[in-house]
Amino acid sequence: MPSYTVTVATGSQWFAGTDDYIYLSLVGSAGCSEKHLLDKPFYNDFERGAVDSYNVIVDDELGDIQLIRIEKRKYWFHDDWYLKYITLKTPCGNYIEFPCYRWISGESEIVLRDGRAKLACDDQIHILKQHRRKELETRQKQYRWMEWTPGFPLSIDAKCHKDLPRDIQFDSEKGVDFVLNYSKAMENLFINRFMHMFQSSWSNFADFEKIFVRISNTISEQVMNHWQEDLMFGYQFLNGCNPVLIQRCTKLPVNLPVTTEMVECSLERQLTLEQEVELGNIFVVDFKLLDGIDVNKTDPCTLQFLAAPICLLYKNLANKIVPIAIQLNQVPGDENPIFLPSDAKYDWLLAKIWVRSSDFHIHQTITHLLRTHLVSEVFGIAMYRQLPAVHPIFKLLVAHVRFTIAINTKAREQLICEYGLFDKANATGGGGHVQLVQKSMQDLTYSSLCFPEAIKARGMDNTEDIPYYFYRDDGLLVWEAIRAFTAEVVDIYYGSDQVVEEDQELQDFVRDVYVYGMRGKKASGFPKSIKTKEKLSEYLTVVIFTASAQHAAVNFGQLFLGMYPEEHFIETPVKEAMALFRKNLDTIVSVIAERNKNKKLPYYYLSPDRIPNSVAI
């Protein structure tokens, strides 16, 4: 009788093992096997991190194995089991891999097909077409869109973390990490003392240094020692945590009535301000999004304030960017003066502090929350709803949305909800942060997520004119590495543009993003469909770059881009493409490390060895 060797790998995360009964059935082209209990006498099967092998003998020839069915039945009490993969050795000596990487909860079953990535057009066998369809029908019931707040991108239909599908919840280890990291951050920053300081007046600027007492790294030390200086202020717009706002000024803002006479002591080329603009030496950061946003009034004992500044910056003869004029609100007038470097020391310093405060609000709410977390969640939900696990695009993207929906759900529970941390700690809390996201949706366009286009749109693409913009330089290297990788994967599975256009699952994925994520707004520029291999590669680059590199640049990460611990792809050409991708990323790491040598203020946020795969890792 035919004999198969079944190898079962259990996950290594906490509580991944099970004591339940596990049954396996084989579905082949010539028939189906009986259920076989996978059990070895006097042995603890399916322990955490274990790889167990079993001999399965069947009565008749099964033909080509198409599916395997795994059933989990209660032994003593219900526990979840994380199945990584199953490898099947056939009677002919061939090996078939069945990736899973899913939790099996309670008394339930899952049906797996082999790990070769397939488009819908590649499936000609009825049972495989049926499996594909049923998987998506089940997922679309589990992953439902919901409007958390009007004007936001739609999110997952879950009130709290435990309502999420088990496969996308934090595992226990990651959940503990989330709590410990949050607690550690509070401890490191002395957050209770920090918040108390803001609820009373500071006696002097030395109080500010108390915030940094527990932080010790090169960047924080440089900032602590030089934060009052104009050079550091300008540098942070290029390479700080929010390097996406500064743009070349092609025309002086009409609501900033600054003159050459006002700033001539800052202009080093003996030219008028207008001439400096024409030469491309003037830059602007405009916080108009904050204009009209309600200030936090949740604590009647604490008065809070918001500014909506316009900051004019100048490229000096050393090619460094420095501020030359600051107006704290949008409408000019006697009560809204323009502050200058020639003003009294603390007048100018306070003006810069207000700008940095405004930068914080835009960074946290727009650059970080909206443009990485919420956007990545949209891609993730659409992926789960429209792409089966066998689809090559699912296999490509799943690592880049890992835990994204979970961490965003936690944020809606604890951070941005009513009475959450935003309400307690931010001047935009109490509803202002919600208004800010709603207002910013009009600027959330597809082209603004295409890194090279976004850089060019702000006039910041000339490396000779602006030589110290490391966010741009490193970002372009990483973008190109990702683009080359996605193009190679697309070439493997899509023989022509026509195959792309006729991939209905792919088109449904893209349409879900447009209709639900971008709320069907044509002005967003998000495609409703994709018709060419080139555009598909670009789209996939946007998804991966947003979740990994862009998030790392504005939030800083700990796990590495290009590392795929879950082996969803099994084909050699894709594994070779992944190896080349990692090699290209290693080259970028070396380039950045060489540039950072001997720099007092190194920039490494976009070094691939510091970029996490997703926003939640």
Image (cartoon, helix red, strand yellow):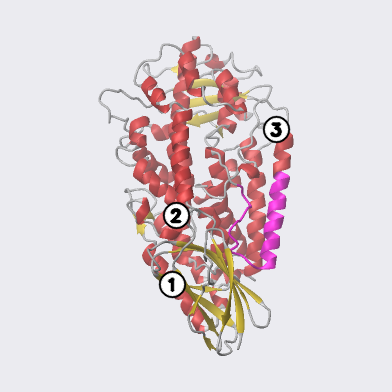
The reply, left or right, for residue 151 in relation to residue 325 is left
Cα distance, mark 1 to mark 3? Answer: 52 Å
Where does the image place residue 85, in percent across and percent down from the top left? 56, 66
- Which residue is identified by label 3? 596
Mark 1 falls on what kind of element?
Answer: strand
Q: Amino acid at mark 1?
A: Glu
- Which residue is identified by label 2? 378
Residue shown at the point (57%, 46%) measured from the top left: 612
Number of numbered discs visible in the structure rendering: 3
Where does the image place residue 521, in percent across and percent down from the top left? 41, 54
Residue shown at the point (46%, 66%) measured from the top left: 386
Q: Give above or below for 277 relative to 24.
A: above
Magenta segment range? 560-588
Q: Amino acid at mark 2?
A: Val
Q: Give above or below for 567 relative to 585.
A: below
Lower position in the chain sequence, tag 3 or tag 2: 2
Dot 3, crowdedness within 10 Å: few (<14), some or many (≥20)? some
Cα distance, mark 2 to mark 1? Answer: 28 Å
Viewer-nearest of discs 1 and 3: 1
Mark 3 falls on what kind of element?
Answer: helix
Q: Mark on residue 109?
A: 1
Q: Is residue 576 visible?
A: yes
Q: Mark on residue 280?
A: none
Seen as rendered, the residue at the extreme left is 300
Residue shown at the point (63%, 58%) measured from the top left: 486
Lower position in the chain sequence, tag 1 or tag 3: 1
Viewer-nearest of discs 2 and 1: 1
